[in-house]
Image (spheres, rainbow, N blue to C red):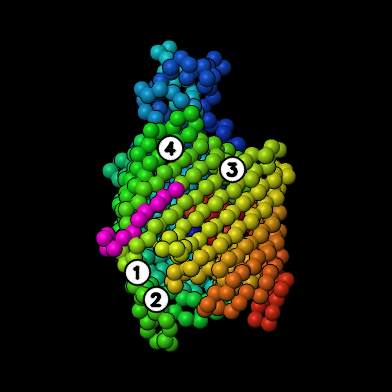
Amino acid sequence: MNCFARIALAAATAATLIGAPLARSEDTKLAFLIAKPVAPASLPTDVELEKRGARIGRIDIQVDDVFESTLSLSTPYRVVNGLHISTHDATVRQQLLFRTGEPFHRRVLEETERLLRGQRYFNDATVTVVRYNEDNTVDVHVRVHDVWTLSPGISFGRKGGENSSRVKFEDTNFLGLGKQISLARSNDVDRTAWRLAYTDPHLLGSWWNLTTAYSSMSDGSEQALELTRPFYALDARWSANLGLSDEDSAVSRYSLGKRIERFDMHEKQVSVGGGISPGLRDGWTIRYLGGFRYDARTFTRHENEPEVDIPEARTLSYPWVGIEILEDNYLSTRNLDQIGRTEDVYLGRSARMQVGFASTAFGSTRDALVIEGALQDGLELGHERYLINSLGWRGRIEGSELNDGVLDVNSRFYLRQSERRVFFASLTASLTSNLDPERQLTLGGDTGLRGYPLRYQAGKANALLTLEERFYSSWQPLKLFNVGAALFVDAGRSWGQDEHATAPAGWLEDVGVGLRLGSARSGLGNVLHIDLAMPLNRTSDIDSLQFLIETRKSF
């Protein structure tokens, strides 16, 4: 959880800001739009430009400061702008999906906007045609809004009755180059850990992504290296990846929110793969995938823990093939899962399916058909109502049994009641079959049942219903946070007997209220949740009121 001390530090000192005027998020948005270059009235429409075969001409980059530079901007904000290292034009340019001399397509400009808005170091991004030239070229203006990305600070969280803390130094846009470095010390119910990580999303100015990480944990360590060239755009023609990881950690089993046993696991993973695609055709992309995976896990007794059944060592080594199908269908809006930020909501249909064959001939400890897949369908129901459904599955078919099988279902519904009110409903469900010993399907305060301890129920299946009335204010205290609130109801339960836990006791419900603080000027891009939840099916081992503080990616 991030208590946003990092953002306050970025704004010099909170004390000097007390006298600064508060800002409305509409004002911020308006300032961002006012300075956008205005296209001449004679500019042809996008359809006309594409029919004429227009090409991209001059490309101008504009990088806005963290705080909008106006005559009335207070001194502390000017200091922050002065200390901030702005994103280099070259960093923005290397992420563009178009180049001078290439054909003009409005779809490509819109996808570039989504790509730029997806970066943690930008608050917003627009790509605009500003001029049509006599040589049948169009000049394009790319405008991005920087945020403060150097985030040293202390964070604290609480959910499911358990505390967590983190001391972290992070820069998501190191020296304005788009690279990410972080050093953190975290402490939660599972472990205490030091973690050092580095990510270069555009290695040597290319689309290759390099990620490295090292963690020293109270229950082990982790080393990871990944080199990936993703399908960075819908029309991208190929991808490739190499991943290596080696991790020692402790695995805990829970019942009624209490850890009942623990053992150690050593895991080595190697993956190599890639894909090819004919590109975007008639609004659809098809990608043909393949690769090889190696996953070896060994288990030992945890020091100072009582004797428990130690799982057998397991190695899966297999080639795999797959296919991915994507529809180009996005909606740009505000005030759904974020507060005062432009959101790109995927409303298309997509499918991804993979199958592999693990064999002792490849070094596996067993023969198995390894399956994995996901489906998604987004619907715009009219009158600003949206329904997004997803289905995911994975597992191993070994002989006549399905082992480590998981089926996940999720539905999200949004109903915009006004510019600043949204009704949200979510239904998630999971069904398992012969989970591997190191896995456990749990439900509690850490998985959305906010009025109960973390990992409270365990079983072979579960379901969770969440209803929220969301409020999005125009208040932006000290120009740092976008403020929202929520009233919520949660209801969930588990089914089936987990052999290591108490049998589920039926449905659990809670009601509560929460404050939401969206990060407006930092590279965190997160929403701080401060919730009070009251369990409606309380027993003597459950507090009458749960206090939760955590940082999430969305409202």
Q: Judge whether residue 321 is colored magenta.
A: no
Label number found at residue 378:
3
Amino acid of disc 2: Pro
Disc 2 secondary structure class: loop
Mark 4, secondary structure of its residue: strand
Residue that badge 2 annotates = 311
Q: Amino acid at mark 4?
A: Ile
Contact flag, marks 4 and 3 (Cβ < 8 Å): no
Does the residue at mark 2 contact the one at mark 1 (Cβ under 8 Å)?
A: yes
Which tag is nearer the camera, tag 1 or tag 3? 1
Q: Are marks 4 and 2 in contact (CB under 8 Å)?
A: no
Residue at image mark 4: 286
Label 2, label 1: how many angstroms apart (C-alpha)?
9 Å
Residue 361 within the segment the image draws in magenta: yes
Q: Nearer the viewer, residue 411 or 201?
A: 411
**Is any part of residue 270 visible from this angle?**
yes
Q: CA distance from mark 1 to mark 3?
A: 38 Å
- The nearer-to-camera label among 2 and 3 is 2
Task: Locate the C terminus by quadrant.
Answer: bottom right
Name the outermost residue toward the front: 400
534 vs 282, nearest the viewer: 282
- Per the rendering, the mark at residue 314 is 1
Could you tell which of marks 4 and 3 lies nearer the N-terminus? Answer: 4
- The label shown at residue 70 is none
Near-viewer residue (140 or 207): 207
- The residue at the point 46 percent across, 57 percent down is 394
Q: Specify the segment rendered in magenta.
A: 353-363
Near mark 3 (Cα within 10 A), the count class, few <14, some 14-19 or many ≥20, is: many
Q: CA distance from mark 2 to mark 3?
A: 41 Å
First in residue order: circle 4 vs circle 2? 4
In this image, 486 relative to 150: left or right? Answer: right
